[in-house]
Every structure is written in C-alpha cells, then in structure tokens.
C-alpha cells in the first residue's frame, strides 16, 4: 500500500531538532522524501504497523503533528508531479 506521510515538528523547544532528524530517518528507512517533511512510503500492512508506531513514539503530541494519507493500490493514477526533483519508481528496478 502507498501512504503519504507528512509531519510538522516544533524545533523551538529542547529536543525538537532531534525529533525532526529521527522522524526523517524513520521515513527514509521505508520510503522516499518528496518534499522537506513529506514522504511516499510503500509498505505492506505489517511494515506499516511497525513504522506507524515508530513515528508516533517519536513525536511530542503536544507540539508536533503527523498526517497519514492512504493512497490505495491504484495510487499512480492519483499522483501528478510537476517541476523539478523527479522521484524514483519504488516498484521499478534500481540501478546503481
């Protein structure tokens, strides 16, 4: 399943920068960054359960927020990209 994850972390208080870095790393472990605080994550249900709990454990719910957009199985038809920074096809072959 494809999920769009976005977050907003307050860096005004102590620990905010650390939470921001940890959230970014957790999202990068499962998907790709498409904007500064927005990631496309393609996972199965078990992986999503693990990642969602990890993300929720990292934030301070009094100061930070997470949003999850469930794009479903036909997500390619619902996503349009315009401009710079093309993204990788997560299902295509990776050539290094």
Image: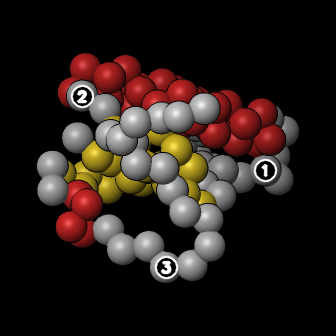
Q: Which residue is mark 2?
A: 44
Identify the mark nearer the N-term, 3 or 1.
1
Q: Residues within 10 Å of mark 1 (few under 14, many from 20)?
A: some
Q: Residues within 10 Å of mark 3 (few under 14, many from 20)?
A: few
Looking at the picture, tell me which residue is in the foreground, 83 or 16.
83
Looking at the picture, tell me which residue is in the foreground, 4 or 12.
4
Q: Residue at x 63, y 39 (%)?
A: 24
Asked where in the image residue 46 lies, by quadrant, the reply is: top left
Looking at the picture, tell me which residue is in the foreground, 86 or 19.
86
Q: Residue at x 57, y 50 (%)?
A: 33
The residue at the far left in this view is: 73
Tally of numbered tags: 3
Identify the mark nearer the N-term, 2 or 3.
2
Q: Is residue 96 left or right of residue 14?
A: left
Rendered image: mark on residue 82: 3
Q: Position of residue 27 (x, y in %)?
A: 53, 36
Is residue 39 among what the camera can see? no
As measured in the structure, the alpha-carbon distance from the residue carrying label 1 to the one carrying label 2 is 31 Å
Element on which disc 1 rests: loop
How is the rendered protein coloured?
secondary structure
Q: Residues within 10 Å of mark 2 (few under 14, many from 20)?
A: few
Is residue 37 among what the camera can see? yes
Labels 1 & 2 near each other (Cβ < 8 A): no
Q: Position of residue 84 (x, y in %)?
A: 62, 73
Q: Residue at x 36, y 74 (%)?
A: 80
Q: Which residue is mark 1?
A: 11
Element on which disc 2 rests: loop
């Amino acid at each position: 399943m494809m999920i769009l994850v976005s977050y907003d972390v307050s860096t005004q208080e102590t620990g905010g920068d650390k939470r921001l870095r940890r959230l970014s790393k957790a999202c990068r472990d499962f998907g790709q960054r498409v904007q500064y605080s927005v990631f496309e994550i393609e996972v199965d249900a078990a992986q999503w359960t693990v990642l969602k709990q990890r993300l929720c454990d990292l934030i301070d719910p009094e100061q930070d927020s997470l949003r999850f957009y469930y794009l479903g199985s036909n997500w390619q038809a619902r996503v349009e990209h315009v401009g710079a920074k093309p993204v990788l096809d997560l299902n295509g072959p990776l050539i290094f």
